[in-house]
Each structure stands twice: as C-alpha cells, then as structure tokens.
Image (cartoon, rainbow, N blue to C red):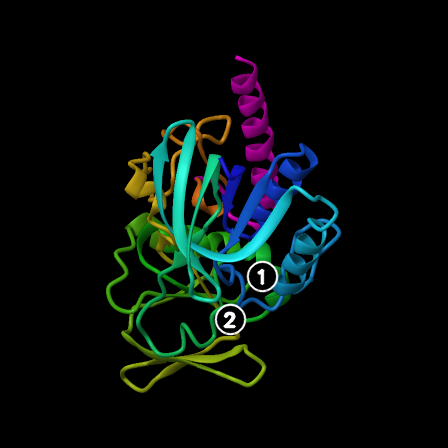
C-alpha cells in the first residue's frame, strides 16, 4: 500500500485527522479538493483560541502545523473514485495540474463535507456568508439586536425563529408563499412578537457592507432587514461513500458508528460528512476522534 491512510478533504476535520495520524507516525496523504463550505464567511466563530479568524487563515494554520510530521503529505488532489481491494482501498482522481492520479491506502477518512442548496432567488447566493446566514451560533452575535428575517416554512422556520430570540427582539419569518405553519406555531410567534410574512419574494437587496437592506416582495413592498437566517437543504459534496455502498442516513449524512467508521469496514467519516451538529470546532474534534479510532483498529489488525 502507498499509504496507511488517505484523508479526503482538507477542512477542519481532514486536517485534524491528519495531524493526529501524523503524530501516530502513520503514512498519510491528505487530498485537498478545494475551498471549504465556510469559505464565503468573513470569520470562524466559537473556535477556542481562534474566534474571529478568517476561514482561509484557520486552514493555513492547520496546514502549517502538518509540516513537522514527515509521514504526512498534503496534495492538491480531487479524488473521484474509490474501490475496495485486498487489505484496503484504491483511489483515483485528478491533481491540481490536471494529471490523472491513483494510489492505495489501508484506510480512508472521508472529510469532504456538504454543500448548501440555496433558494434560486436573487440575493441568496450573492450575500451568502455575510447577510444570508445559516448558523446562529456562528453568526448570531455579529447581528445581535438588529432586525432579522427567518426564511423557511413549517415547524423548522418557527423553531429557528424562536432560537434567534436570544439575539434579537425584532424578527420576522418570511415564507415566500404559503408557510404551512400550524395554529400552534402561529400562536408561539405571536406570543414572542415575531412577525410573519407569506408574500412571494422577488429578491434580497443588500449593501456594500455585505449586510442586507431589505427583503423585496413581488408586489413591490419590502421588509427592511439587516440579515436573514435559513436552514438550507444540504447535499454531500462527494458521492464516494454512496458509490462504495456505504449506509446513508435519512437526512443524507454518511452513517458512522461510535468509532467514526462507516458501514464499509476501513472507511471512516468525520465532520459535516457525518451526522451531527455542524461547526468548525466540532469538525476538528470529529477528525481527531476518527483518527484515534482508526489508528487503534489499524494497530490491532497489524498485530493479528
């Protein structure tokens, strides 16, 4: 085998896994397939000792901290295929220079993350990460006490609006058409003085500071807001787990056991790829956990 472990993905989870495996003196290849999910965000928040750091800076620090470990290699590499072979896996892909690549590894860690599927309305993609936000824990403090909008429908929109009351008392739920909100949900919104607008949305309008100015509706009216939160649907950024036949949860995450191993022996997953809450700090912790469990399993297999 070319490597003990192939780590696919070079975000917080992948770099953390590589760091731990490097300290275990494992031969590791980290395949960096491109920008992370949080690249549009101005800063990473809630990451102990790195609160407020830009996402690119956080990853640059992570890559630098792999340098002292001679058994760890990081390459610009897009892995496009994996198959099981005797004693491990064979992977294929394309390098950053466009050359074909193939390699083998005893174990694989998937840390490829997810992609947010944003509404196909003007402004959502343009202001994603600045005026359009996904996580109150990551961004709520920066827009505290400002007028906020919650985009969504049904129970999910109501729950997100209730959560945001910790950060603002001026909140309106916008549903872009019938909101499918139950009578109880409407009652809860009224009790907390949360507005509800079911007008179809034309676009989001923002300013040069990245914050929103308003939500504009198709009838020409508008709602002045400084930020909009939503829980967007997500898709796996890589189909590798599915192509290998790994179990996928009902929410589209790659299922893992308590040791971070998928339903495919030797294939591990960490970070946003796997189920659980999604934050950079939690992804880094999950990468470390996967590496520890993998290393111990690999050690036992070598001694058998």
Along the polypeptide, which appears first: circle 1 or circle 2? 1
Residue 61: quadrant of the picture: bottom right
With 142 as the anchor, is 130 left or right in this view? left
* Residue 137 left/right relative to 206: right
**Rendering coords of residue 95 (x, y %):** 46, 60
Name the residue tied to disc 1: 139
Q: Residues within 10 Å of mark 2 (few under 14, many from 20)?
A: many
Residue at image coords 45%, 62%: 194
Image: magenta residue range: 275-304
Q: Residues within 10 Å of mark 1 (few under 14, many from 20)?
A: many
> From mark 1 to mark 2, how far is it between C-alphas?
10 Å
Q: Is residue 289 within the magenta segment?
A: yes
279 shown above or below 214: above
Residue bearing mark 2? 227
Q: Secondary structure at mark 2?
A: strand
The prevailing secondary structure element of the residues shown in magenta is helix
User: Element under label 1?
Assistant: helix
Whether residue 290 is in magenta: the answer is yes
Q: Are marks 1 and 2 in contact (CB under 8 Å)?
A: yes
């Amino acid at each position: 085998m070319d490597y003990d472990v192939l780590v696919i993905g070079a975000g917080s989870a992948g770099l953390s896994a590589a760091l731990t495996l490097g300290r275990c003196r494992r031969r590791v290849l980290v395949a960096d397939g491109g920008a992370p999910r949080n690249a549009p965000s101005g800063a990473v928040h809630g990451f102990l000792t790195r609160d407020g750091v830009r996402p690119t800076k956080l990853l640059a620090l992570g890559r630098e901290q792999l340098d002292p470990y001679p058994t760890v290699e990081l390459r610009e590499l897009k892995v496009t295929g994996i198959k099981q072979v005797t004693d491990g896996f064979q992977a294929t892909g394309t390098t950053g220079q466009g050359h074909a690549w193939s390699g083998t590894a005893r174990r694989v860690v998937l840390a490829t993350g997810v992609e947010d599927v944003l509404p196909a309305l003007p402004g959502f993609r343009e202001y994603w990460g600045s005026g359009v936000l996904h996580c109150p824990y990551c961004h709520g403090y920066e827009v505290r006490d400002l007028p906020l909008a919650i985009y969504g429908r049904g129970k999910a929109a109501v729950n997100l609006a209730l959560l945001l009351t910790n950060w603002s008392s001026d909140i309106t739920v916008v549903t872009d058409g019938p909101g499918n909100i139950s009578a109880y949900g409407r009652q809860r919104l009224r009790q907390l003085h949360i507005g509800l607008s079911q007008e179809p949305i034309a676009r989001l309008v923002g300013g040069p500071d990245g914050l929103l100015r308003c939500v504009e509706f198709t009838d020409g009216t508008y709602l002045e807001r400084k930020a909009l939160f939503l829980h967007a649907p997500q898709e796996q950024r890589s189909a590798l787990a599915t192509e290998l036949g790994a179990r996928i949860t009902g929410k589209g995450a790659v299922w893992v056991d308590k040791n971070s191993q998928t339903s495919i022996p030797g294939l591990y997953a960490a970070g946003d790829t796997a189920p659980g809450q999604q934050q950079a700090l939690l992804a880094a912790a999950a990468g470390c956990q996967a590496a520890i469990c993998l290393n111990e399993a690999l050690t036992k297999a070598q001694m058998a």
